[in-house]
Image (cartoon, rainbow, N blue to C red):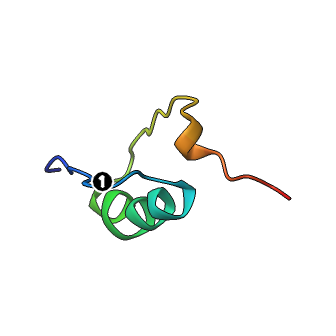
């Protein structure tokens, strides 16, 4: 997969769109996805 450069800050919505539209479809089965606890991955709940 090619690297992505974000020219603006990334939030949970943008991350989910990238995950759903670009990353997950490019993975082969079986795959493992390891994610860290970055603040952009958390969506604020009100």
Q: Is residue 10 above or below residue 31?
A: below
Query: Residue at left 42%, top 59%?
Result: 19
Residue sitting at the far left: 2
Q: Is residue 5 above or below residue 21?
A: above
Which secondary structure lies at badge 1?
A: loop
Residue sitting at the far right: 46
Query: Residue at left 33%, top 55%?
Result: 8
Q: Is residue 17 above or below residue 33?
A: below
Query: Residue at left 38%, top 43%?
Result: 31
* Depth check, front residue: 23 or 8: 8
* Depth check, front residue: 16 or 27: 16
Residue that carries the numbered disc 1 in the rendered image = 28
Residue 46 spot, x, y in % from top left: 86, 59
In the visual, does 17 lie left or right of 8? Answer: right
Residue 32 spot, x, y in % from top left: 43, 38
Residue 7 spot, x, y in % from top left: 25, 54
* Depth check, front residue: 26 or 46: 46
In the visual, does 28 lie left or right of 10? Answer: left
For the image, the number of numbered tags is 1
Residue 18, by quadrant, is: bottom left
Query: Residue at left 17%, top 50%?
Result: 1
Q: Is residue 30 above or below residue 45?
A: above
Residue sitting at the far front: 8
Residue 17 spot, x, y in % from top left: 45, 67
């Amino acid at each position: 997969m090619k690297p992505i450069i974000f020219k603006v800050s990334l939030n949970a919505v943008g991350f989910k769109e990238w995950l759903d539209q670009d990353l997950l479809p490019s993975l082969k089965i079986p795959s493992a996805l390891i994610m860290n606890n970055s603040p952009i991955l958390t969506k604020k709940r009100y």
